[in-house]
Amino acid sequence: MYKKLLFILLLASLLGFLLYLKPFERPKKELEKVEKFLPDSELVGRIYLLDFLTESTDLMLFNEISQRQFLTSEFVLSLAKKFGLDVQNPVYVFANERGDAGSVIPLYTSQKLKSALDRISLENNVEDTIIGQDQIYHLTDYQLHIFHRDHFLFIYYGDYFFETYQKSISNPGDEISDVWKGLFSNPIFPNENFVLYSESKALKQFGLDHAYMAHDSDSSGFHLKSCIQINDSIPFFVKDSGRAIKFSERSKRTIDLHLNTNDLSEPVKALLIEKLSLLTSKINFPIAEFIDIWSGDFCFEEGGYYLISEKYIETELDDNFEPTQVEKIRYKNVPRYSLMFTVQRSANQLINKLLTKGILTQEGSQFRFLFSPQLKLGLSDDQVVFYSTLNPPRNYISYRNRVQWTYKGTNFQFQVDSLADEKVFGSIEVPMQKILESIAFL
């Protein structure tokens, strides 16, 4: 009896010792990080989707977006759980100037995705492709590719899926790409729900190193706060006010900038000429001559029309069928176009240079910039004004620095807040109407 008891105690001791040295539990497999599979892109972003939707609630209510109950954080969370999507962690987005874009969504389980993918396959033209361990779903009508791993769902729109897949998915490196590192470091907007980052070639060719943008909630539109890092330090700063011209409310493109360009050193002036020359290289604009006389205020306006009347002579037959000349008045719309900049001294030399290069042509007493309408010219000691209206635009003191530009039917606004420490701080506004058109299916 005692021998059996001692034997059981010995076995228990040995078992306890073995459990201490090597516990009998399932080996832990370290989860692969989603960040390792994020494709190198020109524009990348991170969204805390639930917080972003909560922040946008007032915007959706104000604009009376139909079916907005499906855009609440509660509904999206319940739907995400149904399909195994982990929207409580960041969702990543990316895009390129060539037209492709996509999203990488983390998963807490991939088992629930099958029903969703099966339904997509039934309701759309879908081609299945197996690449290694991945089953790729190609929605041919929408240029969409979808696939998933155990820990992420990859959605891609565009024509370069297989190129992106080979570079980022099939053989991921040990480290994430530099552009995503830039987004994750994010010293400018670390606590925002929606942040975009870019260090594309399009920025670098204009002397800009990278740019951060973050969503700022507002009921009237979609606002992005921005910070642009300049490669080179250019010591001129935004002025609080400056001379400007009144714009028409119907103008589609306007520039209202006021910079302090006084006392620029020769090296800095050369650097500024180099950067601005990139913007005007196609027409070979004489930037050096412009910078030499410019005193910092610059206004431009394009868009809208104004009605003018003009007299003309028309030959008619009188009651006796004799030809007679009759003076008449006709009305026509003239495109509204204005350009004003302030100068430190006479601009005659610059005007002559523009005429010599053919950028400016003279027709009688009026002028034309390339394909602009005919313009009148107003010259003074400290200001140059070109205008198409009957009278010159009214001068006033402006207290803002803003660019409003229409691109492909969408009106964007960029507000410059400050220039300091090689950084440009500002905001970009996208009108809510354009966003509503884009999501009309809701």
Image: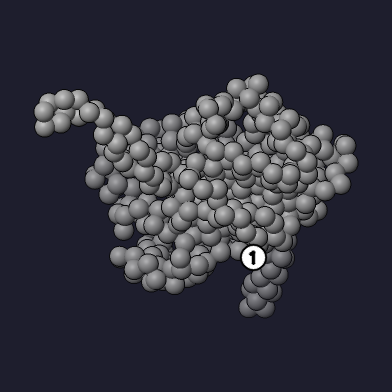
Residue pointed to by mark 1: 191
Q: Is residue 194 above or below residue 283?
A: below
List the single residue furthest toward the left.
320
Rendering coords of residue 103 (x, y %): 49, 47
22 shown above or below 266: below
Position of residue 18 measured from the top left corner of the image (x, y, whole percent): 69, 62
Q: Is residue 433 above or below residue 17?
A: above
Task: From the viewer's side, name the closer residue of 300 and 45.
Answer: 300
| 73 w.r.t. 281: above or below | below
User: Where the C terminus falls, by quadrant?
Assistant: bottom left
Residue drawn at (64%, 31%) of the image: 280
Regarding mark 1 in the picture, which secondary structure is present there? loop
- Name of the residue lying farthest toward the front: 320
Residue 16 drawn at (x, y percent): 69, 68
User: Residue at 53% of width from left, 32% of height from top?
Assistant: 366
The quarter in which the N terminus is drawn is bottom right
Answer with left or right where residue 2 lies relative to residue 167: right
Asked if residue 44 can be seen in this view, the reply is: no
Residue 284 is situated, as x and y percent measured from the top left of the image, at: 65, 25
